[in-house]
Image: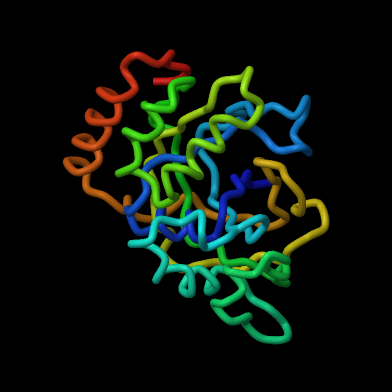
């Protein structure tokens, strides 16, 4: 079965449009040993609405929050964009749209908050929220994954199953999906950004390259 990586819907949207190149992860409470590991180097991007709040997204990117709702399908109708400002969260959709897949081009272990802040041009979260991802489980470093993302020719709708829910990173999808499509950035654009990210993370410990 195809492997998918869970990330906020607004983040998946940004990755699929070339507006974000990184993801930051330490692991959810339903991960094995509650620690994140890079178990796969190629995977589909699964949009989730768990714990997603507009205040954690950069102000310049907040207009995209409403569009992120297009990543889900609700049987009783799409919720309003105002759900991103509510404390009780966003109701789970019945189905989600898979529109992209990614390869891990490089990965680093980060412990310095200055490095997380310097990488801000490559993610759409607020730097404060990105640093919170670093500070959680303070004794452990933050995984920074540089992703080369590809848009599949036509989005595929996948039913949300109970085993997909909760704070976990990796899923096995009950539907065959093709690793097809075009990269969201040209080789030149991606290579230039990758070099800049490498320069920022050069004092970090490389995990995969």
- Viewport quadrant of the C terminus: top left
191 or 91, which is in the foreground?
91
Judged left or right of residue 155, residue 29 is: right
In the rendered image, is residue 62 in sight? yes
Q: Vertically, is 202 above or below 59?
A: above
Residue 104 placement: quadrant? top left
Instruction: Residue at 48% x, 62% y: name it.
Output: 99
Indicate left or right for 123 with 132 as reference. Answer: left
Question: Is residue 86 toward the left or the right of residue 148 in the image?
Answer: right
Residue 115: x and y in percent read: 37, 27
The quadrant in which residue 13 appears is bottom left
- Can you give x and y, in whole percent of width and height, for residue 105 in the image? 39, 31
13 to 196, vertically: above or below: below
Give how far across and how far down residue 205 sits, in percent.
Answer: 43, 13
Residue at (57, 32) in percent of width and height: 40
Visible in this render: residue 109? no
- In percent of width and height, residue 57 lies at 46, 56
Q: Is residue 110 left or right of residue 198?
A: right
Q: Residue furthest right?
A: 162
Q: Using the image, determine if residue 79 lies above or below residue 159.
A: below
Work out whether residue 179 or residue 95 is closer to the camera in this orientation and state it.
95
């Amino acid at each position: 079965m195809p492997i998918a990586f869970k990330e906020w819907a607004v983040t998946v949207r940004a990755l699929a449009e070339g507006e974000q190149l990184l993801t930051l992860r330490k692991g959810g409470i339903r991960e094995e040993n509650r620690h994140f590991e890079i178990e796969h180097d190629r995977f589909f991007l699964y949009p989730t609405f768990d714990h997603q709040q507009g205040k954690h997204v950069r102000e310049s990117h907040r207009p995209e929050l409403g569009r992120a709702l297009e990543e889900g399908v609700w049987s009783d109708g799409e919720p309003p964009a105002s759900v991103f400002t509510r404390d009780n969260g966003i109701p789970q959709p019945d189905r989600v749209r898979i529109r992209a897949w990614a390869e891990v081009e490089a990965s680093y272990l980060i412990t310095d908050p200055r490095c997380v802040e310097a990488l801000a041009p490559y993610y759409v979260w607020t730097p404060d929220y990105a640093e919170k991802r670093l500070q959680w489980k303070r004794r452990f470093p933050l995984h920074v994954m540089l992703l080369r993302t590809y848009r599949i020719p036509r989005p595929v709708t996948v039913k949300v199953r109970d085993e997909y829910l909760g704070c976990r990173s990796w899923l096995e999808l009950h539907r065959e999906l093709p690793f097809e499509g075009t990269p969201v950035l040209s080789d030149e654009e991606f290579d230039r950004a990758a070099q800049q990210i490498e320069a920022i993370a050069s004092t970090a410990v490389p995990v995969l390259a």
